Every structure is written in structure tokens, then in C-alpha cells.
Image (tube, rainbow, N blue to C red):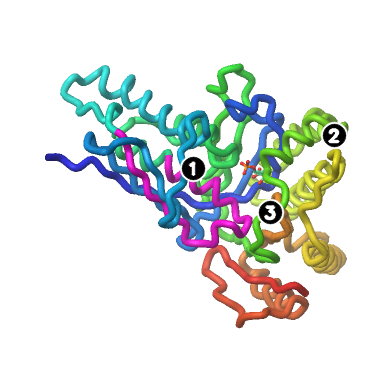
Amino acid sequence: MAIYQATASAPVNIACIKYWGKRDTKLILPTNSSLSVTLDQDHLRSTTTARADPSFERDRLWLNGTEEEIKDVGRLATCIKEMKRIRREVVEAKDPQAPKLSTFPVHIASHNNFPTAAGLASSASGFAALVSALAALYELPSSPSELSVIARQGSGSACRSLFGGFVAWEMGSAADGHDSLAVEVAPQSHWPEMHALICVVSDDKKGTSSTSGMQRTVETSALLQHRIKEVVPARMAEITAAIKARDFDAFARVTMADSNQFHAVALDTEPPIFYMNDVSRAIIALVVEYNRVALEKTGKRKAAYTFDAGPNAVIYAPAENMREIVSLIVRYFPQKDAFKDVFGLFGVAGVGEG
Ligand code: PMV
């Protein structure tokens, strides 16, 4: 009896132009395009194994060893159903010899090699790995952009984790969402000097989930309307040009401005949402001061902070500045534990409570 099983993994991505707001909550269609850097590094990945077997009773999923419920109309069920549909239409309908895997229940086991609740975009790598594992299991000929349309329906930001390097999620305009997908802006090899340092300020689970936060912002924030119409389209063009030209100063300026505006939009929500805490703001002050000195000396910024829907900082910088930045962070934010690893390409640093 044949065994039908496949494993795939996907990395975390961190947005420079933030996705915040849905125009369609079921299909997860965003109110603006976004752009991220994939932290394509061994230490921040989800790895997922999927197995199809006619003897299984139903679809089941385990996350880090604990079973998660697959709710009937939930996002996990949507992604699994969509992948089975593609298997049926693209493989089984065309090749009568192909095993009818789309009719078998699947068991899926997923593992993150970083703390799931640490606000490190585990849903992005998780859904990207899930879709990739099913695509491998079902032997689909789909491109990463095609798969990103399915991953997007698990968690919006997951669509960007189908690519490494620098990735745009084009918002699209079709009502069915087929053109709301991820595209590669540049591969990682285009700008290997770009590094990221993750400062885990708090590994508590975030207070307001991105789903409910976005919904409230869309319903109540006037600033969001200005952002999606007047600000983001120009920023997408600007940061794409900065990446293509490997212009770190422009990249840093746009990245920090967009993080600031995302958190301003959260504050403009009724009731307001605060994702950053005092340590987050102290990290901003440190990067601003570091850049002020650099701007005075050379006219160019040396680091860029960005914060997602939580207090943890990600600092982008050219590799040559990282040692200096890490030593500044360690000096101003003494560690509770011995300073952990600073990984080769993308570092993870624990930052204590000041
Ligand atoms: O994909 P979600 O629902 O986890 O939302 C992600 C939202 C941000 O991380 C704040 C921004 C982004 O573009 O990743």
C-alpha cells in the first residue's frame, strides 16, 4: 500500500509596508498592498508534514504536538478544501491513473522552531508551510504566486511567506480574489547585506488579535482611509525602487514611516489599540538617535525599526552595522538571560523589560 506523505517548510516574514485592513473578510482581501522581507533563515520556520490516507476518519491537525480543532467554516478548513479542489481539478481530472488523494482525509503536523506566541508572525509561516506541504503531497504544478492565493485565505500575511527575499502582496481588484497575490520584488541574493535583528520585548500573547483589530480600524478610523488612498501606493513604489537600487537610506525612511503610521492608525481606532509598550518606544528612540548621528556624519541612515501587532521590534540594517546595533541594544536593554545567539544572517535577540 502506497504512502502519501510530504513535508515542506516556510519562513517568517516581517512587513516594511504594513497590511492592515480587509475589504473582504471571508476571502481575506486587503485594503492596501504590502511589502515584506522574508527572514529566510533556518531558525524561524514552520515545518509541516501532511499525509493522506483512506483509513483516516477525518482531517486533523497538530501544532507543536497539540491537536487544533479544524472548524467547519474556519480558515484551516478553507485552505485544506481549496488544496483538495486544485488536486481534483488540476491532477485527478486530467489523469485517470492519479490516485484520488482529494477524497482521502489528511493528517497534518506542524512545528515552529520559535515560540509560537512570541508575536513573530507564526501564522504567516504556519499557513505558508501548510499550503506548501499539501501542494507537495498533491503534486500540484502550481507556482508560488498561485499557492499564495490559498495561503492568503489562511492568514493574509502568509501569502508573502511563499517567497524568499523581498516580496509584495498586490492587493488586486477582482471580487473573487484571484489577483490578490504575492510576487517577488527581488530575491534575497539581490541584497544579501540586508539583515534583521529581532528584539523580543515580550513573549506574551498579543492583546488584540490582528483580525479583530483590523476590523475595528476599518470601521472607525478616518486616518486609515487617508492611508490606503493617499499614502500606501506611493510608498509601495518608493520602497520597491529602494530595494531595486539597494538604497538602504530610502528603505529605512519608508519602513520606519510606515511602521509609525500603522501604529497611528491603531491609535486612531475606536476604542484605541496600543501594540507597542515603553520598551518598544525606547527602542525607537535609540534607533532615531543612532540615525541622527549617522545622518549628521554621512547623510544616510544606518538602521530601521518596524513593529507589527505587538511590542517586539525588528531592526533592519546592513550587516556591517549589526555588531554595533547589537551592542547598543545589549547596553541599553540588559538581558535577563545571557545574550542568546546572534545568528549569521538574521539575528534573534531577547530584550528584557528595560
Ligand atoms: O496576516 P495577519 O492577520 O497576521 O496580519 C498581519 C498584520 C501585520 O503583521 C501587523 C502587518 C503585516 O503586513 O504583516
Q: Amino acid at mark 3?
A: Lys
Dot 3 alpha-carbon crowd within 10 angstroms: few under 14, some 14 to 19, many 20 or more: some
Q: Quadrant of residue 239?
A: top right
Quadrant, the N terminus: top left
The front one of 247 and 42 is 42
Q: Residue at x 47, y 55 (%)?
A: 45
Say which residue label 3 marks.
206
- Horizontal arrangement in the rendering, residue 229 relative to residue 26 (left or right): right
Say which residue label 1 marks.
127
Q: Residue at x 68, y 64 (%)?
A: 202
Indicate the secondary structure of the residue bearing disc 1: helix
In the image, which residues are magenta?
105-130
Q: Is residue 306 magenta?
A: no
Instruction: Give the mark, 3 or 1, whose residue is nearer the N terminus.
Output: 1
Q: Is mark 3 within 8 Å of ligand 1?
A: no
Residue 298 shows in the view = no
